[in-house]
Image (cartoon, coloured by chain):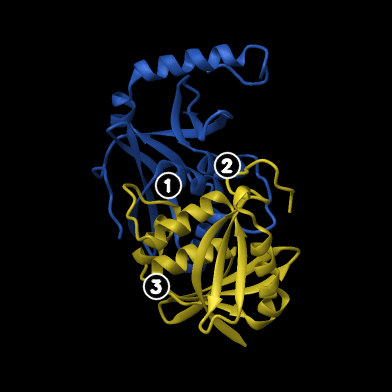
Chain colours: A blue, B yellow
Amino acid sequence: MSQGNAPQNQSIVEYQIERVVDETSTETRIVVLSRKDGDPDAFPIWIGAAEGHAIKLALDATVTPRPMTHDLIKSFAEHLGVTVRRVVVSDVRNSTYYATVHLGNNGVERILDARPSDALALALRVHCPIYIAEDVLARRSTANLDAWLAKLESKRIGAQPEVREI
Amino acid sequence: MITQMHLKGLMFDPYNNAYIVVLRDEDGSEMLPIWVGKSEANSISMALENVGPPRPMTHDFMKSFLDAYDAKVLSVVITDLADHTYFAKIHLMYGDSEYTVDARPSDAIALALRSQAPIFAKESVLTKQSSEELEQWLENLKPEDFGKLDSGEEK
């Protein structure tokens, strides 16, 4: 049932999905978010290959012959007259990110617990804003991020010149 | 006419590097194989085994979305088969109204299993897909085929 992991009224910052980074050797993908206000900051979230695919389809505005799983959730929302207002990466515990999906219907807000990958895949399809809680931004491990960025930079040289600096 | 189907099993198809959801009718005379992707198979398998994952998987999230609004899945129906693509409908009860939502069978089945909703197939789908085809396919499958991942021809 509806439940939130994070306290209400938490400070949040708006982000957007930059891209999905493929690691072809593994079943892991990295979805990279950037600040909507243009401040340089990249926020990576490690997700599964199928989840990455679901996000990439929406990011590239790919039209599939049949509705994919998150298209079906969007379709349910439309049938039920429910608006997806926003999604929030609301918490991080034991290296796992948690997200909330905020739904509106007849002036009543309901908050659902979700994996960030599902929240993001849905957000792209319904064109709702994406936020990350300040608390989550403050508590992310910078050590991991630096290691990841170093790896990405070395990979990127010559390979993907179109990718902009982060 | 529609026939109620039961989930008979889930197996790996080494030829297509995909998974097959096998539906069977009550008396076992009709069999309907549906080819699905790996993540869809995984989701169906988790519902079958009643595994509660530590975090909600996509279809669990879908279910909690419907639960939040007391929308009930009445049934799902496999409605059509065209060019090896199956079509399904999800019948929902919300408030006093019934809604029919277009879906892929893999999503419909994954949701039906989580909602204890019956799964039906239209008779026309069953006649199109004769169960002989599957049995023949199964007969041709040799034990050494299992685990062969990369040589499958494209569907």
Report x, y in % for residue A148. 45, 18
Residue A36 visible in this rendered orientation of the protein? no
Q: Quadrant of the N terminus of chain B?
A: bottom right
Q: Give the amino acid at mark 1.
A: Arg
Q: Which residue is mark 1?
A: A86
Q: At 43% from the left edge and 34% from the top edge, which residue is drawn?
A: A14
Against A98, residue A64 (above or below) is below
Chain holding disc 2: A
Coordinates of residue B81 in the picture (x, y in percent)? 70, 70
- Give the alpha-carbon distance from disc 1 to disc 3, as whole Å: 30 Å
Quarter of the figure with residue A68: bottom right
Name the image quarter holding the C terminus of chain B: bottom right
Which of the two discs, 1 and 2, sits closer to the camera? 2
- Other residues around mark 2 within 10 Å, as few (<14) / some (14–19) / many (≥20): some
C-alpha gap between disc 3 and disc 2: 29 Å
Q: Nearer the viewer, mark 1 or mark 3?
A: 3
Q: Going 33% across and 35% down the picture, which residue do you hit?
A: A96
Disc 3 marks which amino acid?
A: Gln
Residue A116 location in percent, x, y?
Answer: 41, 41
Decide: is A76 above or below A22: below
Residue type, label 2: His
Q: Residue drawn at (45%, 57%), measured in percent from left and top?
A: B45
Mark nearer the viewer, 3 or 2: 3
Asked where in the image residue B149 lies, by quadrant, the reply is: top right
What residue is at 35 percent from the left and 18 percent from the top? A142
Specify whether residue A20 is in view.
yes
Q: Mark 1 and mark 2 in contact? Answer it, CB < 8 Å.
A: no
**Residue A43: horizontal and vertical position, in percent?**
44, 27
Disc 1 is attached to a residue of which chain? A
* Residue B44 placement, left or right of A136: right
- SS at circle 3: loop
